[in-house]
Image: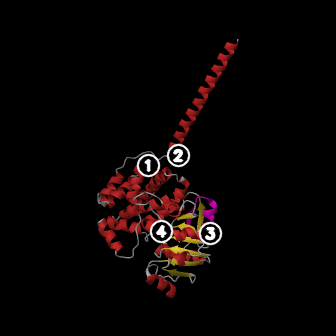
Amino acid sequence: MKIAVFGSGSFGTAMASVVARNGHDVIILTRREDVATCINENGRNPQHLTAYELPKNVRATMDAEEAISNAGAIVHAIPMQSTEEFLDGVKDLVKRSGALFVNTSKGLHGETLELMHDVLKRSLGSNHPCAFFGGPTFAEQLMNGTPSGGVMAARDMATAERASALFAGPKMRVYPSTDVVGVEIGGALKNVIAILAGGLEGMGLGVNAQTLLITRGCREMTRLGVAMGAKEHTMAGLSGIGDLMLTCLGDASRNKAVGIAFGRGQKVEDILSERAQSLKGVAEGVATAPAAERLARKLGVAAPMITTCAQCLRGELDAKAALMQCMTLPIRPDEPLDDNKGVAARVISFVTHGTCALLGAFTASWIRSRSRDRA
């Protein structure tokens, strides 16, 4: 099968290699002429993962029509905040192709608070086949064949399984799912918590502090995810706690790197300026944190860590003040999320049974009254 990959950054290059190793013919769509030339002539990406030779069945182009024509699937690896603008230029080609669209980008839209499935629905239409990949997968380790795994979600299991099969192989396990929101929200929010985890490391604090943050951060992610319709078991899986652990603890995490610099006392604007002038990649958590803060407020979900991260990025808190704020939060009982559902269910049950009892009593009274009248 011919597969088009949108984006020649680290993750796009890595995912192109993963599907190429499964025997597919892969063409990377890039906006850089030097990248296309080097991939086609030298078999390497000159900007990202330069140490790795690409499979022979990977090539590149700057021509969207060439990339998309006759493709059976498209792997999307353009950053979330740039996706809609990018798709505006190619969406007609994508829709005409009917190709399965597999999204690997993570985040919340900075203005609309949408997840990627909302953006794709608006750009490609509600009937275009789409799947959404998430999980603990650093690009370089995908390239070097480290055993890895992720989750592939779609509205229906058949599409999820079809998309999973493109990536699954001896070094890659991909679990199909129908929990699109769970896979997406886990991939978005873990970047926010990773910035805070980096801050702790930058301050020189040890694994006690980091483990506390990661565990409670997962709880916060789960609360917000479930409020959006995600399944709690998804948040406890590879695309939730798994991706969170990788991004908070792994040395290749871009979001953690931002946090480390912040924890060492650098100003946020200086950190982001330095990254923009290099090839260090987009730290999606920077745009996601304020969006997630607004989303949590909109849904009425307590998200103090997400709020703290957003405050740090706005310059309202330094690292020490952020730590103090989190450590002085009210301590509440650690209870299952479904307790609230249980209370609601009990209330509904009480009302239902009470209504039935009242109706029964009314009916019995009416029957007795009719009987007396007839007598």
Q: Earlier in the sequence, mark 2 or mark 1?
A: 1
Q: Most extreme residue toward the bottom, as rendered?
A: 41
Residue ID at (60%, 62%): 176
Q: CA distance from mark 2 to mark 1?
A: 17 Å
Q: Earlier in the sequence, mark 3 or mark 4?
A: 4
Tell me the residue that label 4 is attached to: 87
Please give the range of residues in magenta.
148-162
Dividing the picture into quadrants, the one containing residue 282 is: bottom left
Q: Are marks 3 and 1 in contact (CB under 8 Å)?
A: no
Q: Earlier in the sequence, mark 4 or mark 1?
A: 4
Is residue 209 something one can see in this rendering? no
Tell me the residue that label 2 is attached to: 338
Tell me the residue that label 3 is attached to: 165
Q: CA distance from mark 4 to mark 1?
A: 29 Å
Which of labels 2 and 1 is toward the front? Answer: 1
Q: CA distance from mark 3 to mark 1?
A: 36 Å
210 relative to 32, above or below: above
332 relative to 21, above or below: above
The foreground one among 95 and 168 is: 95
Q: Is residue 209 magenta?
A: no
Q: Residue 200: give x, y in percent of width and height.
A: 36, 62
Q: Are marks 2 and 4 in contact (CB under 8 Å)?
A: no
The label on residue 299 is 1
Q: Is residue 156 magenta?
A: yes
Q: Disc 4 marks which amino acid?
A: Leu
Q: Earlier in the sequence, mark 3 or mark 1?
A: 3
Q: Disc 2 marks which amino acid?
A: Asp
